[in-house]
Image: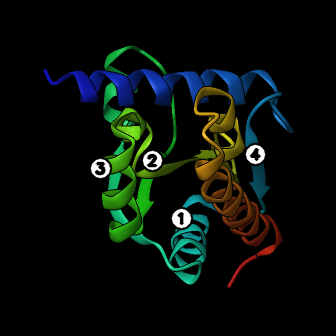
Amino acid sequence: MKPLYWLIRAAALLCLALSLAAPARAEGLLMARSQQMFPEAMTTLQNAITARGYTITRLQEVNENLAKMHFKSDMYRVVFFGRYDQIDALTRRYPELIPYLPLSITIFAEGNQSIVVAMPPRALEEMFPDPALRPVFEGWQRDYQAIFDRVRETTGF
């Protein structure tokens, strides 16, 4: 299997483990609970992402792999997204950012509600202290917060 596949798989499982350990908030992660059921919350999440000017690049189903490891999960997806021009420019200048792009948010069902969780983009500042990257990470952080707020505040159709 491809190394990126295993990296994505490990990151998804880590996010799941951390999010289940603290139902309302996990230290070091962005997290929001939606009163919507999974299908509606997934639509809200995708709409919030595109409203911020991003393109969704892939929806990764994780349920099947979790089931193979005997882990029970109702619905579980990782949504990858970005702005092509920005990602292209960043990875050309900073190839060490490649493992963190495109951006991603994990969403999973918890009963009749849904939870979204992600690593805060500002956390990348510690790993990549180049001052030229700070505005990029801050912009992503603002966008993530707006996306999470939208998911948290939307109650249904």
Residue sitting at 36 percent across and 48 percent down?
A: 93
Reading the image, the residue beneath label 4 is 31
| Nearest to viewer (mark 1 / mark 4) | 4
Locate residue 17, reporting x and y percent.
Answer: 63, 21
Q: Give the crowd class for mark 2: few <14, some 14-19, many >=20 residues within 10 Å.
A: some
Residue sitting at 76 percent across and 75 percent down?
A: 154
Q: Are the residues at dot 1 and dot 2 in contact (C-beta closer than 8 Å)?
A: yes
Locate residue 8, reporting x and y percent.
Answer: 37, 31
Marker disc for residue 42:
1
Q: Secondary structure at mark 1?
A: helix
- The quarter holding residue 80 reads bottom left
Q: Secondary structure at mark 2?
A: strand
Reading the image, the residue beneath label 3 is 92
In this view, the residue farthest toward the top is 69
Whole-Å distance between the Cαs marked 1 and 2?
A: 9 Å
Q: Are the residues at dot 2 and dot 4 in contact (C-beta closer than 8 Å)?
A: no
Q: Nearer the viewer, residue 138 or 113?
A: 138
Whole-Å distance between the Cαs marked 2 and 4?
A: 15 Å
